[in-house]
Every structure is written in structure tokens, then in C-alpha cells.
Image (cartoon, rainbow, N blue to C red):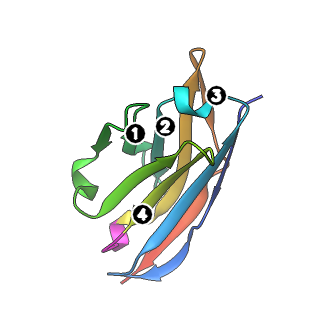
Amino acid sequence: QVQLVESGGGLVQAGGSLRLSCAVSGIIFRFNNMGWYRQAPGKQRELVASISIYDTRNYAESVKGRFTISRDNAKNTVVLQMNSLRPDDTAVYYCNTVSGNIASWGQGTQVTVSS
């Protein structure tokens, strides 16, 4: 059973930083691509950043230069470092992977950026 557990969300002022972490179990982590998504109230869930098994990284245009995704295959974790946060980054952030054509999601962690 795949399990993803996010942590690290919270309330921060605009311009501040947060570090989200996702602990993964139930899969061979190093063989899975990973992603961070977010969903703001009244909006669709969107991909924020992804990292492949080869460490190839992709970012949404809105977070390029501010967010960094990384993975630690020894610890089965994926991290999203978020700098220069803005109020429009406010959302629930979810960790994601697809294994065996089945998408798995964490429970989400709330990020709130005040102006």
C-alpha cells in the first residue's frame, strides 16, 4: 500500500520561506517520479513541480526561480523548498506519485501566505 505523508506547511508572511517534505512508503521510491501539486480554494489542482527518477525537474511558470524540488532516495522523501512566497501561493499542497498506473496522493498540507 502506497503511503505519502506531507509535512512542513504553515502560515508565513509574503517574502518568507517554507520547506515541505513528503515521506513515501509502499513503493520502490527510486523507481518512481514524484510531484507536488497544489489546490487553492475554488480552483483546480495544479502541478507545481516534478522530479523524475533521473533528477530531471520541471516547474510551473508561476514558481520558477522561487521553488526547488529535490529527492532523497536513501530516505524515501521528496522536498519542496519554497522561497519568496506570495499570497497567491496560498493553497493545500499535495505530494503525488504514479505507480502501476495508479495515482497516489498524500493528505495535503496547508500553506498560507499573508500579505
Q: Which mark is residue 28?
A: 3
Q: Mark 2 falls on what kind of element?
A: strand
Q: Nearer the viewer, residue 28 or 98?
A: 28
What residue is drawn where x is 57% and y is 58%? 21
Q: Mark 1 falls on what kind of element?
A: strand
Q: Position of residue 14 (x, y in %)?
A: 35, 81
Mark 1 in CB contact with mark 2 (< 8 angstroms): yes
Question: Which residue reaches farthest right?
Answer: 1
Q: Which mark is residue 51?
A: 1
Q: Which circle's residue, 3 or 2, is located before the other in the chain?
A: 3
Label 3: few (<14), some (14–19) or many (≥20) C-alpha neighbours in 10 Å: few
Q: Which circle's residue, 1 or 2, is located before the other in the chain?
A: 2
Between the residue at mark 3 and the residue at mark 2, the CA separation in whole angstroms equals 12 Å
Q: Which mark is residue 34?
A: 2
Q: Quadrant of the N terminus?
A: top right
Q: Mark 3 falls on what kind of element?
A: loop
Q: Amino acid at mark 2?
A: Met
Q: Which circle's residue, 1 or 3, is located before the other in the chain?
A: 3
Q: Nearer the viewer, residue 54 or 10?
A: 54
The residue carrying mark 4 is 81
Between the residue at mark 1 and the residue at mark 2, the CA separation in whole angstroms equals 5 Å
Q: Amino acid at mark 1?
A: Ile
Q: How many marks?
A: 4
Q: Which circle's residue, 4 or 3, is located before the other in the chain?
A: 3
